Image (tube, rainbow, N blue to C red):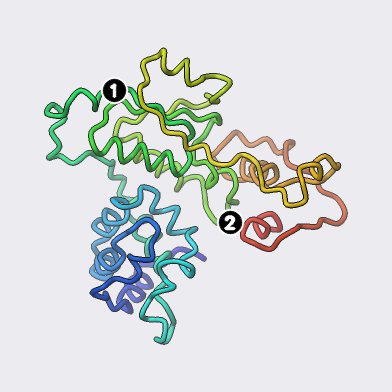
Amino acid sequence: NRVYTEKEAIAEASRCFKCADSPCRKSCSTGIDIRSFIYQIENRNYYGAAKTILSDNPLGLSCGALCPITELCASTCNAHWLDGGVINIGRLQEYACKVFKEMRVKQIRDPNLDLKSLNKAYQKKIAIIGCGAASISCATYLARMGYSNVNVFEKKSYGGGLVANEIPPNRTNWGDLEWEISLMTDLGVIVHYNKEFGKDLTYDSLKKEGYEYFFFGVGFDKANAPLGNDIYMIPNVYNSKVFLPNVCENTKKGMTENINEKLFKLHGHVMILGIGDTALDCAR
């Protein structure tokens, strides 16, 4: 769906009951104060709405566009019986973050945080492996708390993980994800690209460089193979973990230097096994 206009966002926000017990928040996997940010949108406080969202979820824009709200927050919405159904929380969240993105406000630590008063543990070197959603969140929260030596190591030339290389541009774009990554680096987090764990660096090599704490946010690099891994030995049989990165890297403007010769050349009939979101992404 396209992003709301301001008029549409305010109208949708005004439908919300602002329930005292906030069942939507209880059903949100990241615990965002949904009632508050919808109230702020209704009152045209888009900065406040985005601050509420991003405080609880550093990837609030991506989640607003992609989160299956019908299975989570919206599933408990008390407006389900109204004309128009449940509140479209995802689109409101996406709208607030989009408006905030255009404000070009950099993320900063809490001004009341006195870094000099923190003990020396906050200066120790932290290595975060992978630059996907989990790692971006981890690094952001560490930096907000005052840890000043947080380094992220990513094997590809871009960050974002699955959101970047497995979700096609009809559902998310590189510009929004790049902005979310920039909010992390605003806090002093350093991202080292083209550094693959196990090849360019190891646990031992990082220990020798003085890293004392580690977070692994590498996700799964292989697709589930219910028919067995041998099926991928057959010519022209691919899994989503191979197919979708190829599509995304060649179609998301600005993410990589697009080289169209690398796109899969498919001819004749194509059969897709499954009909979940991933299968539909492949079909599109």
281 lies left or right of 237: left
Q: Residue 44 carries which label?
A: none
Front one among 115 and 47? 115
Under mark 1, the amino acid is Lys
Q: Where is residue 158 in the image (x, y as percent from the top left)?
A: 52, 34
The extreme top residue here reads 208
Front one among 248 and 129? 129
271 lies left or right of 242: right
Q: In which quarter of the image is residue 110?
A: top left
Task: Point out the tag, 1 or 2, that comes first from the N-terminus.
Answer: 1
Dot 1, crowdedness within 10 Å: few (<14), some or many (≥20)? some
| Residue lying at 43% horizontally and 59% vertically, measured from the top left | 64
| Residue lying at 49% horizontally and 34% vertically, measured from the top left | 130
Q: In which quarter of the image is residue 255?
A: top right
Kind of element beneath mark 1: loop
Which residue position holds label 2? 170
Q: Which mark is residue 124?
A: 1
Q: Where is residue 28 in the image (x, y as percent from the top left)?
A: 38, 62
Q: In this view, does 242 lie above or below 204?
A: below
Kind of element beneath mark 2: loop
Front one among 93 and 135? 135
The quarter of the picture where the C terminus appears is bottom right
114 lies left or right of 86: left
Q: Where is residue 53 in the image (x, y as percent from the top left)?
A: 31, 56
| Residue lying at 28% horizontally and 68% vertically, measured from the top left | 35
Under mark 2, the amino acid is Asn
Front one among 15 and 198? 198
Residues at circles 1 and 2 in contact by the CB criterion of under 8 Å: no
| Residue lying at 69% horizontally and 42% vertically, measured from the top left | 242
Q: Is residue 68 above or below residue 58?
A: below
